[in-house]
Image (cartoon, helix red, strand yellow):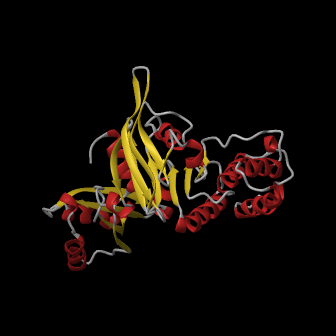
Amino acid sequence: MDVLLEARNLTKSFGSLKAVDNISLSVKKGEVLGFLGPNGAGKTTTMKMITGFLSPSEGETFVCGEPVSTASVAARTHMGYLPEGAPLYGDMTPRSFLTFMALARGIEKNEADSIVESAANAVHLDSVMEQRNETLSKGYKRRVGLAAAILHAPDVLILDEPTDGLDPNQKHEVRRLIEAMSVDRAIIISTHILEEVDAICHRAVIINQGRIVADGTPSELKGRSAYKNAVTLLLPKSEAERAAAALKNIAMIERIEASAEGANVRLTVLSKGRSDISESISDIAAVSMWPVTEFSIDNGRLDDVFRNLTVGEV
């Protein structure tokens, strides 16, 4: 089966508030989908409906072909879920909690110990396995939750802010783990960290006010940015003003942004219609003998696209 998870027309209303409005999406085997949106956009509500923790007002989710609403147990055997906040039993240790989760998942008792050890090693829990959960740092609690989500080797992983509370090294480790697990699984990651989309996601869906406003690869989304094909030059302050004045005369230039960096100024030149202006600027710089120490072409910026889709229009 190629498509391991499919959500069809998910809608959720709380009284007069429509938190999620007709969201449909699918995730294939081997695909990591980034699920993005501002606070209050409906990300967590959508993920709770996908996993069966919240019943939709309308719509249905299928996990490995099993409908979540009418075949909940069968669907959940294929699914691992890391919810927001990593809720744990505080008086348990990571070892006892993961063992409890393994047995609840139907894993045989004689296999549970080795499976728990493997999941704990994958997220580097070795040093805290006998410590009470309530005494763990936020980062370690997150890792215990992630271990619980993966210990039964699910076909579909739903991860709500999986790197929340982790330091940069821990984030890198979790991203590597997600990338390795994605080979034969479908994974959805809800995140507000846009660098994670570039780092590990094959596709991204952006929602705003409960509706999907964009769906594409990170490269496709960045192609909608005003900074696509923007040219950046680093010049001494003494030359920057003259260069900016000359560049403004090029018809295809939309605007120029300047920022000081010590004795230098970084000029970012945005083109009209995201057209390629790099050769024109390079030629002018060469003919004018500007002392350019850096010259780069922007691929576009996800934060720019995200901001415009959730505040204005791209």
What is the residue that sits farthest to the top in this orientation? 15
Residue at 44% over, 56% down: 27
- Would you say 267 lies left or right of 63 here? left
Residue 308: x and y in percent read: 32, 45
Residue 129: x and y in percent read: 83, 54
Comparing 174 with 109, the one in front is 109
Comparing 204 with 254, the one in front is 204
Residue 263: x and y in percent read: 43, 64
Comparing 107 with 286, the one in front is 107
The answer to whether 3 is drawn above or below residue 44 in the figure is below
> Which quarter of the picture shows residue 114?
bottom right
Comparing 271 with 145, the one in front is 145
- Would you say 52 lies left or right of 260 here? right
Residue at 37% over, 48% down: 306
Q: Can residue 160 be seen in this view?
A: no
The answer to whether 106 is drawn above or below residue 122 in the figure is above
Q: Can residue 18 be seen in this view?
A: yes
Residue 56: x and y in percent read: 46, 33
The quarter of the rendered structure image containing the N terminus is bottom left
Count the marks: how many? 0
What is the residue that sits farthest to the right in this orientation? 130
The answer to whether 60 is drawn above or below residue 248 in the figure is above
Residue at 21% over, 77% down: 283
Residue at 66% over, 59% down: 170
